Each structure stands twice: as structure tokens, then as C-alpha cells.
Amino acid sequence: MSSLQKIAHVDDDESIRAIAKVALERIGKFTLLSCASGKEALEKIPEFAPDIILLDVMMPGLDGPTTLKQLREKMNLDETAVIFMTAKVQSSEVEYYKSLGAFNVILKPFDAMGLSDQLKNYWVQYNGE
């Protein structure tokens, strides 16, 4: 299993991006690509080639599910764990997001101090360890 190093985070909320940046870069020591929209994600993520994509569900323009669909058309995501982040996490919605190809769903607001460890655990699970 390769180690978790590169994470792409897509969220239209600037304050959430700022919190995730501190959590993932300073605490987790990951290389982070932060995108403010689905459109920006489509432009930058293929070249960045992240291990994990954290994708906000509700964004103006391209929402998370549509962004994921279009990313799959642009690049191979077979070895990339996609994790949706949303405040809506009823079991039927979680199953829907997983049916779209998401590995898991993180509830917002998320625990900034625990986010890096949570993603490390998901990475191990994703790789079947």
C-alpha cells in the first residue's frame, strides 16, 4: 500500500477550506490542493493526482456528485478514495453517495483536530489493510 500523501479538497466555503488547510497541512503534514469550486477541481485535480479527494456535496454551479462524474470522465480514479463531505448524512443519502463511487462520507461540521487521523484510517480501509 502506498502511503497517504496528497489530498484534494473541494469546498465553496472559504472558512471550511481554511480549517481543512490547517488540519491537513499543519497537523497531518499532507500535500493539499484546495479548490473553491467543481470547475476549479476539474481543472486542477487531474494534474495533481491526489490519493484522496474530499468533495463537498452542495456547491453552486457543479455540485459534488456532478464534479465526481466529470472527474471520472477526465481521469482514472480507481486508486483514488473519494470522500464526500456534507451536513446531510441520513443513511439513504450515504448509500446514494456510495453508489456514485464515494468510499465514505464525512459529516460537517467535521472535527478539525481529528480529520488527518480520520483520513489515514479511511486510507487504510480503502486499501484493504
Image (spheres, helix red, strand yellow):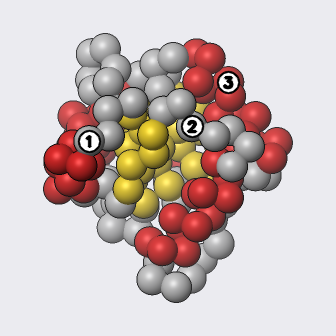
Q: Which residue in the protein does label 1 denote?
A: 90
Q: Residue at x 39, y 34 (%)?
A: 86
Q: Of circles 2 and 3, which is in front?
A: 2
Question: Upstream in the sequence, badge 2 or badge 1?
Answer: 1
Q: Which residue in the protein does label 2 denote?
A: 110
* Residue 94 coordinates in the image, percent (x, y): 26, 49
Which one is nearer the viewer's eye here, 79 or 64?
A: 64
* Residue 35 coordinates in the image, percent (x, y): 51, 28
- Tag 3, which secondary structure? helix
Cα distance, mark 2 to mark 3?
13 Å
Q: Residue at x 38, y 43 (%)?
A: 84
Q: Which residue in the protein does label 3 denote?
A: 18
Residue type, mark 3 in image: Ala
Above-or-below relation of 34 to 23: above
* Residue 48 coordinates in the image, percent (x, y): 53, 47
Going by the picture, which residue comes out furthest to the right?
A: 26
Residue type, mark 2 in image: Phe
Residue type, mark 1 in image: Gln
Q: Are marks 2 and 1 in contact (CB under 8 Å)?
A: no
Question: Upstream in the sequence, badge 1 or badge 3?
Answer: 3
Cα distance, mark 2 to mark 1?
16 Å
How many C-alpha atoms fall within 10 Å of the one at disc 1: few (<14), some, or many (≥20)? few
Above-or-below relation of 38 to 120: above
Name the side, left or right, on which 98 lies relative to 59: left
How many C-alpha atoms fall within 10 Å of the one at disc 2: few (<14), some, or many (≥20)? some
Which one is nearer the viewer's eye here, 68 or 83?
A: 83
Q: Quadrant of residue 76?
A: bottom left
Q: Of circles 1 and 3, which is in front?
A: 1
Above-or-below relation of 92 to 33: below
Q: Residue at x 68, y 28 (%)?
A: 19
**Is residue 31 visible in this depiction of the protein?**
no
